[in-house]
Amino acid sequence: MANEEHLAILKQGVEAWNKWREENPDMKPDLSEADLFQITLSEADLNRANLSNADLSEADLSWANLSRTDLYRANLDGVDLHDANLDRSYLRNASLTGARLIAALCREADLCEANLSGADLSRADLGGAHLIRANLSEADLSEADLREADLHNADLSRAHLRGTNLEGAIVGSTVLGDVNFSKVRGLETVTHLGPSTIGIDTIYRSNGKIPEVFLRGCGVPDNFIAYVGSLVGKAIEYYSCFISYSSKDQECAERLHNDLQAKGVRCWFAPEDLKIGDKFRTRIDEAIRYYDKLLIILSEHSIHSDWVESEVESAFEKESRHKRTVLFPIRVDDAVMETDQAWAADIRRTRHIGDFRGWRDHDKYGERFARLLRDLQAVDAQEVVAPPVARPPKTKATPTETYRASLRKNLVEWFNDSELRDLCFDLGVDYESLSGDNKADKARELVAYCERRQIVPDLVAKCKELRPKASWEGEYE
């Protein structure tokens, strides 16, 4: 149990806590089993503290010092740990599902049997980390440093590995299903303690760009390796998709499903693909996570379906987490253009909706199906940044130079790099396309971009929502 005195000091705030730590450098705080749900501890000094079995879910621990901290079996689901120091921390059996560890330091951390499913570990330093039997399924490890990390018996299925450094990493009985290795560094130097599971989907997603020595180490036989090039002479042509629809639109859904399958598009929809005994809601949630796109059939029936609404919310969550477009809406009548249902109206305002009215007409259907098929063509099979959303200008107001400078200054002061990236995504702006190597450059280019697109009011409105304490008012020309 937590030391009540230590817990009381912590709840006084970060400033009081850090001062107490400075005055008591040899003290090892005991916060075990503490209820710290949604607590704000940004920049807190928690070095060597005992937080085992503590509930830190959805807490703000950004920039915090958690080096050598005991977090055994701690609940860290949804926690914000961006830029935090977790070097040599003890996180065995901890739960970090959906956690944000962007650019965090996790060198030589013990993450054995930790659940990191869906966590954002982009640009994190996991050099020498112990990830034995860790669940890294659907985790974002792009640009992460996993040099000499121990990944044997870990599950990396559907993890994002663009630019990941695996130099000197250790694998064995590691699950490597449905991942793209084509942009991974250091595969030739990986140490294999035994064979690993590497799926045929991984071979195709990687377009065969996996070193032979790595495949051989995973246990892939030489006679198969010899034919990998011919197997993937053609890269994945289409995104996979899950079809969401009302049961009253079953006939249309079946036609789309059959025609997409015939064209080589991997697609899933409930009636055909549910196995006997599957839990219906759980199985569908898994399908939405697994497939690249959610193809939603909008009709007078589906826009009033709680089921369809839930599936759309899952797709929006996936878009937010992976920063890429997931939702592909089509309509079979005019209901979505007239509805006041909030989620459907939001789709109407922000997305191009494919027009499948008159889908029973052979010629009309054929023309619109061809367009849908073209839109489902894969760009890079896995890592695709959401394109900018076209927005009608609210006003043609132009900020004065003084206000431009004020906006740039506030963006630099009130947002860190990862938050600025998230802000760009919310505005439909491709962060990577903004020129500049630092935050100040990106902020300047973001303001200029919004001015060119006449969406400065959108930028200001979003900033007010995210940072209400800052001053965002200004003059326009």
Image: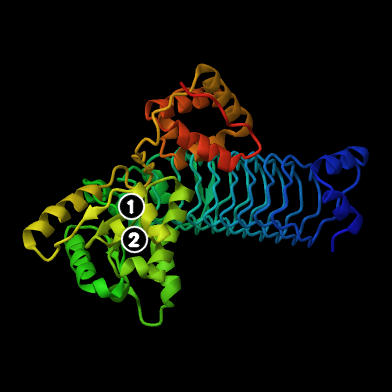
- Name the outermost residue toward the bottom: 277
- Outermost residue, left direction? 363
Left or right of 35 in this view: 186 = left
- Asked if 421 appears above or below 153 in the picture, the reply is above
Neighbor class of circle 2 (other Cα within 10 Å; few <14, some 14-19, many 20+) is some
Nearer the observer, 317 or 56: 317
Q: CA distance from mark 2 to mark 1?
A: 9 Å
Residue that mark 1 sits on? 348
Residue located beneath label 2 in the image: 339
Sequence order check, earlier mark of 2 and 1: 2
Q: Secondary structure at mark 2?
A: loop
Kindly tell me whether residue 220 is visible in this rendering. no
**218 vs 408, nearest the viewer:** 408
Q: Position of residue 323 (x, y in %)?
A: 44, 45
Point 20% across, 52% down: residue:
373
Depth order, front residue of 366/343: 343
- Please state the total of marks drawn on the protein image: 2
The x and y percentages for residue 305 are 37, 70
Picture coordinates of residue 174, whole percent (x, y): 49, 57
Q: Is residue 150 above or below residue 410?
A: below
Amino acid on which the number 1 mark rests in the picture = Arg
- SS state under label 1: helix
Looking at the figure, which quarter contains the N terminus? bottom right
Q: Give x and y (percent) for residue 178.
A: 38, 55
Circles 2 and 1 in contact, beta carbons < 8 Å: yes
Type of the residue with mark 2: Thr
